[in-house]
Amino acid sequence: MFDPTAFDNMKVVIEGALYDLDISGEIVITDRNDSVNMAKMSRTFDLSFRLPGKKVKATIELQSGLINLAAELLPSIQSEEQAGCMLSLQFTAKDELDIDFTTLKSLLEDIWGPTRTITQRVLYDPLSIVPTKTLIIKIEFDRLIHEDQIEDLVEMTEFIITTLKRLNEEIS
């Protein structure tokens, strides 16, 4: 048996909070990935979900690299500030044509604050039989999340649910 890392502990907290919401029917989990990249000694965990009957999907992603793991397991290198994970959120909607991107940015900044990096992209496949557009919104926190902020991850699920509700209202 091994001692769980900060990544493991944060992943379990995120999973628990979101699966509790799935069991209660507040969200529907649609995908889950837990990957280890042996070439780079990194880990990535993501979980995707949506509100029941709605089309905007949210994905929460947690990443930890070799530097983060080494900082945690080798205290002799004295870089404890590197012991943590990167966290990002992504919201995806398909087939949306009339979107006011400025309004969406304001809506997201209202929920997440102006210090987050918020990007919006639209993917378009002109060669498909029925051309579709996919809106991808990414919110990045641009700093490591540490284990002492683990309770914030549970509270963050409320902000994600709020974002899903508001995006579904704005985009539908």
Image (spheres, rainbow, N blue to C red):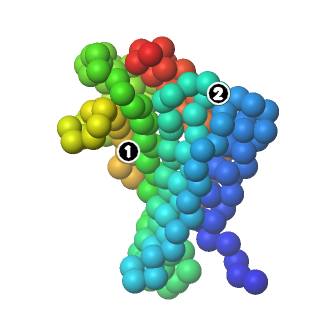
**Residue bearing the label numbered 2:** 52
Q: Nearer the viewer, residue 86 or 53?
A: 53
Q: Quadrant of residue 67?
A: bottom left
Q: Is residue 148 above or below residue 80?
A: above
Point 68% across, 57% down: residue: 12
Q: Local crowd at mark 1 within 10 Å, few (<14), some, or many (≥20)?
A: some
Q: Which amino acid type is shown beneath numbered disc 1?
A: Glu
Point 52% across, 83% down: residue: 74
Q: Nearer the viewer, residue 33 or 77?
A: 33
Point 76% across, 83% down: residue: 1
**Residue bearing the label numbered 1:** 140
**Residue 151 seen:** yes
Q: Earlier in the sequence, mark 1 or mark 2?
A: 2
Residue 20 lies left or right of residue 141; in this view the side is right
Point 58% across, 40% down: residue: 49
Which mark is nearer the camera, 1 or 2? Answer: 2
Q: Which amino acid type is shown beneath numbered disc 2?
A: Pro
Q: Quadrant of residue 26?
A: top right
Distance from the alpha carbon under mark 1 to that under mark 2 = 25 Å
**Residue 79 seen:** no
Q: Nearer the viewer, residue 133 or 22?
A: 133
Q: Residue 103: x and y, percent?
A: 31, 16
* Quadrant of the image containing the C terminus: top left
Q: Residue furthest left?
A: 126
